[in-house]
Amino acid sequence: MIIEPRMRGFICVTSHPDGCAQSVRNQIEYVQSKGEIDGPKKVLVIGASTGFGLASRIAAAFGSDAATIGVFFEKPPVEGKPGSPGWYNSAAFEAEAYQAGLYAKSVNGDAFSNEIKRQTLDLIKADLGQVDLVIYSLASPVRLHPVTGVLHRSVLKPIGATYTNKTVDFHTGVVTDISIAPCQDDDIANTVAVMGGEDWAMWIDALKAENLLAPGVKTVAYSYIGPSLTEAVYRKGTIGRAKDHLEASAFSISDSLKSIDGQALVSVNKALVTQASSAIPVIPLYISLLYKIMKEKGIHEGCIEQIQRLYQDRLYTGEAIPTDDKGRIRIDDWEMRDDVQEQVAALWQQATTESLAEIGDLEGYRKDFLNLFGFDFAGVDYKADSDEMIDIPSIS
């Protein structure tokens, strides 16, 4: 079938298998171009099919020759209807890994559930014995709690007062003001339950209980801070409370790993175009301005550049891992440079529908958004028939 992008609000409801495969190949080539990483050899990535999680799997496999197990919750294709982009990403990753002689298997299902944890633990036990790196990169709006049975839904809202600021519809380029009402009742608790550190700790406890963590194991979860411009709706909003909980969980998890000389860390990463960030008001306008500035300065990074630098320059240098005063790895250091943020703040005041095309990088934003779904990659013939019925080898 010929597959074209079809938009529904802030999401694309189609994905292109050949484009997703090209995306994976591009990321592999980047990692290989940067040289060998003296890093992990047996890796579990929880949330492994898109974004930072996929980049983490690629960087481990093709930078460090690591065996990888990826856990994700993706939709397979059916005749005449493409699967989700994460499904095609994972299929392409496994195919490339096998061709390179690397172990790669995947588990598709709800990573919050006891069933998927059990399936993953059994796979590690059977095939790898132990893992020496666990990446936690889940991004889900809901969580069915495996103990209480309660379905928690996260919200992206400010706390205490209505928040009003500029935003942009990245499809049309129209800049408008938007107001977001503050959270209510159990919104904070529910958001923390979904996006905080409880499930990360559950995974590590389950792995440790069955002796599946190698001595010296590292586990890393991903977070974001961002500038003062976005903090009311992000870092000081409901999602910020969840990130606070995630970051605090790193210390308790590290304590639980002391007996095997293990360490839990949070990496604060750069703002990037993701399915989640595209739906957060204000963030697309900020990213459009940020991209323009960072590209001009030659310091722009996507997911794979961020994670490759995280592995090579932070996690696996042979020296103590540098962290900030709250124990976090700051791989957002280039985004948060004073000169970058001062320019973003100045451009923010100038941002209108008329000026954004010149002062921002809305085209770069749109391209990255389409890339998430396998569209707009050089070297892919989007007018040709594409086979939507692609299997993930280790799952089919």
Image (cartoon, rainbow, N blue to C red):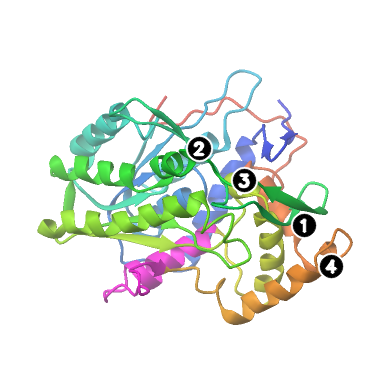
Q: Earlier in the sequence, mark 4 or mark 1?
A: 4
In primary-sequence order, the first of circles 2 and 3 is 2
Percent of width and height locating residue 295:
67, 71
**Which mark sits nearer the N-terminus, 4 or 2?**
2
Q: Tag 1: Cα neighbours inside 10 Å, few (<14), some, or many (≥20)?
A: some
**What is the crowding at mark 4: few (fewer than 14 residues within 10 Å), some, or many (at least 20)?**
few
Using the rendered image of the protein, determine whether residue 36 is visible from the camera's viewpoint: no
Residue at mark 3: 372
Q: What residue type is disc 1 on?
A: Glu
Q: Report the residue at 72% width, 31% height from top.
A: 3
Work out whether mark 1 precedes mark 3 in sequence or the reverse, and give the earlier one: 1
Amino acid type shown at disc 2: Pro
Q: Which residues are magenta?
A: 303-329
User: Which residue in the structure is indicated by mark 1?
Assistant: 363
Who is closer to the viewer here, 253 or 321?
Answer: 253
Q: Calculate the distance from the C-alpha at mark 2 to the C-alpha at mark 3.
A: 18 Å
- Tag 4 residue: 358
For the residues labelled 4 and 1, the Cα–Cα distance comes to: 10 Å
Q: CA distance from mark 1 to mark 2?
A: 27 Å
* Label 1 residue SS: helix
Q: CA distance from mark 4 to mark 2?
A: 34 Å
- Marks 2 & 3, CB-CB < 8 Å contact: no
Few, some or many residues within 10 Å of mark 2 (<14, 14–19, 20+): some
| Residue 141 disc label | 2
Please name the residue shown 65% across and 48% down the image: 278
- Residue farthest along the top direction in this orientation: 79
In the image, residue 66 lies in the stretch drawn in magenta: no
Q: Mark 1 to mark 3: distance in Å?
A: 14 Å
The secondary structure type at the circle numbered 3 is helix
Q: Position of residue 300 (x, y in %)?
A: 61, 69
Q: Is residue 151 above or below residue 364?
A: above
